[in-house]
Image (cartoon, rainbow, N blue to C red):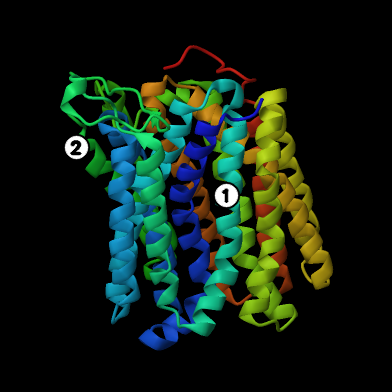
Amino acid sequence: MRAVPGERAVLLAVALCGILPPLNTTMIAVALPNLLRHLGAGVSGGGWVVACYLIVIAPVQPIAGKLGDRYGRRTLMLIGLAAFAVFSVGAGLAPSLPVLIAMRVLQGLSGALVFPNATGLIRELIPEQRRARAYGLFGGVIGVSAALGPPIGGGLTSLLGWRWIFFVNVPVTLVAVLMLVRVVRAPAPADPSASPAADPSAAALPARPSGRPTFDVSGAVVLVVLLGGAAALALEGGRIGGAPLIAPVGAAIAVLFALFLLRESRHPDPVFDPRLFRNRGFAAAAAGVSFGNLALYTTLLATPLLFERTTGWSAGQIGLALAVLSAPTAVLAPLGGALADRLGRRLPATLGQAIVAVGLVPLALWPSSSPGVVLVCLAVAGVGGGLTGAAQQAAAVEAVSADKAGVASGIFSTSRYIGGIGGAVVLAGLLNGHVGADGFGALFAVTAAAGLVAAAAGLGLPGRRPAGPPL
């Protein structure tokens, strides 16, 4: 089945909204040397420019999804887009590294409002028989934005300066806002005469239920502190204090997180609902996307270092080479969604992650291979990534009822970013140790193993419909 014209407009609007977070994750990598040189900062400062964005966007997404469930996804997306544009301008004008890091944190907060509510909109507005294909198209656009990030960042930095990697967000955000307002209506008010006639071509969102418990503000604050603290400890603990610091602080965070989950399980309307993980399909989707993203994101970060060591290529050439990994993921994401609609969620997710592992195993065994061999391995891994994402995303949101799609999507997205943070942690040893071929081999062995774990998690996904009744 093909999407009807109204559905295509919704998908286009949602995709434009969704490209900003991944684009701003990959685009900055190529610009970092120039950025750090102009701001007089060291490598550790550059690490925080990248890491602070991930640390913030990961724990805030479940909160943003929960707010979207309660107050409307369209409203949250418009607020997030407007704020993202403002803080992008602030990042581009930043006079110092601390100001830039602060703007990146605020960018992360704004982007977190957008992404889970974008995927929640698809859950609400696209029928189930076309939903995985819709997620595939959405994932394809996201993949294209991630693939274009390095060459766009390199081109803007070379032609206009590093500040333009932030300024470019403004026109993209403006178009996304206009599309969202044009094709997605807000929920109708109780008195139809109280509002002007809506555009009949716009897709209408379901009205929001009333009479819910007070929003879980304290849970939201604790979640941000715990997940942000855990990520910061993983990224900086070894540099600051090593094992004497990591062990006790990590244990304390683990205990506090367990208490937090116990408290959330008893809350009438929790911001992070641990009961979601009782559904096998949701738990499998979250585990699969976390380990799968660890594999692909670590590879994305490590490959420029490998090429720099073995080829002497410029930043622009390396940025183009990274498209060999990201482009197949983007191009094949719609096919992965179509397969998930036709064959069920389990097969594409499991097969795709297995292909990712197959592509990375040769890099683990022979990390000093010729650039051509490395590029072929990256392309194979990218093919696997393209087959996987839509099936995982569809299974995650189908595990719950429509009114909880936002929080489910937020927790699922958090799992994705936790995988990315894990990739940065894995790479930290390579950056700090300045290791040679053996270090790259060990690194790619970890990524291949993560791909296999993600493939095993795919076996727990349901078929076309949720494994059990929505939670």
Q: Residue at x 83, y 65 (%)?
A: 373
Disc 2 crowd rating (10 Å Cα; few below 14, some 14-19, many 20+) is few
For residue 280, what is the image quadrant? top right
Q: Up-down: is 21 above or below 154? A: above
Q: Up-down: is 256 above or below 178? A: above
Q: Secondary structure at mark 2?
A: helix
User: Which residue in the protein does label 1 denote?
Assistant: 141
Of 67 and 265, nearer the camera is 67
User: Which residue in the protein does label 2 denote?
Assistant: 217
Q: Is mark 1 in CB contact (under 8 Å) with mark 2? A: no
Q: Position of residue 84 (x, y in %)?
A: 33, 58
Q: Amino acid at mark 2?
A: Val
Q: Amino acid at mark 1?
A: Val
Residue 87 shown left or right of residue 363 in the figure: left
Q: Residue at x 43, y 40 (%)?
A: 118
Q: Position of residue 422 (x, y in %)?
A: 51, 53
Alpha carbon distance from label 1 to label 2? 33 Å
Q: Up-down: is 205 above or below 118? A: above
Q: Position of residue 428 (x, y in %)?
A: 52, 66
Q: Secondary structure at mark 1?
A: helix
Which quadrant is the C terminus positioned in? top left
Residue 436 shown left or right of residue 361 in the figure: left
Q: Residue at x 57, y 16 (%)?
A: 467
Q: Up-down: is 166 above or below 131? A: below
Which quadrant is the N terminus positioned in? top right
For residue 204, what is the image quadrant? top left
The numbered mark at residue 69 is none
